[in-house]
Image (cartoon, rainbow, N blue to C red):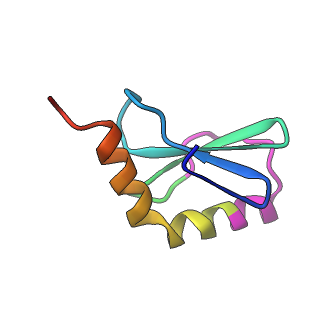
Amino acid sequence: MIFSFESLKFNINARDHNPPHVHVEGGGTSVRINLRTLEFMNEETGFSKSTLDRIMGEVVRRKYELLEEWEKYHEED
């Protein structure tokens, strides 16, 4: 886990596929967000619109931190 916010867990998985993205989980549901375009990568999430707005706000605030973490996990040898 990279960090948590309002009982949501924000994760970047090692050896994950491109594009750079963050997984956000909580309440038995999840969403993936593209860190370059700041778009949701899955159509159905199970999160309410207000929760998705809060999630996106947090990703926007931490975009560069999350991209740095992505690069750490996905450095080419």
Q: Is residue 69 magenta?
A: no
Residue 44 makes an appearance in the image? no
Q: Position of residue 47 (x, y in %)?
A: 80, 49
The verdict on residue 51 being magenta is yes
Image quarter of the C terminus:
top left
Question: Looking at the figure, which quarter contains the N terminus?
Answer: top right
Residue in the image at 48% along x and 59% along y: 38
Q: Decide if residue 4 is on the left or right side of residue 34.
A: right
Q: Position of residue 20 (x, y in %)?
A: 38, 44
Q: Residue at x 38, y 30 (%)?
A: 17
Question: Relative to residue 73, is residue 35 drawn left or right?
Answer: right
Q: Observer-nearest residue: 8 or 55?
A: 8
Q: Which residues are magenta?
A: 40-54
Spot occupied by residue 2 in the image (x, y as percentages of width and height): 54, 49
Q: Is residue 49 visible?
A: yes
Q: What residue appears at the point 37 percent right and 27 percent down from the top-left corner?
A: 15
Quarter where residue 31 is shown: top right
Image position of 67 (left or right of 31): left
Q: Is residue 6 left or right of residue 9?
A: right
Q: What is the quadrant of residue 4 in the picture?
A: bottom right
Q: Position of residue 7 (x, y in %)?
A: 79, 54
Q: What kind of secondary structure does the magenta stretch mostly adopt?
A: loop
- The count of marks equals 0
Q: Which of 2 and 42 lies nearest the eye of the viewer?
A: 2
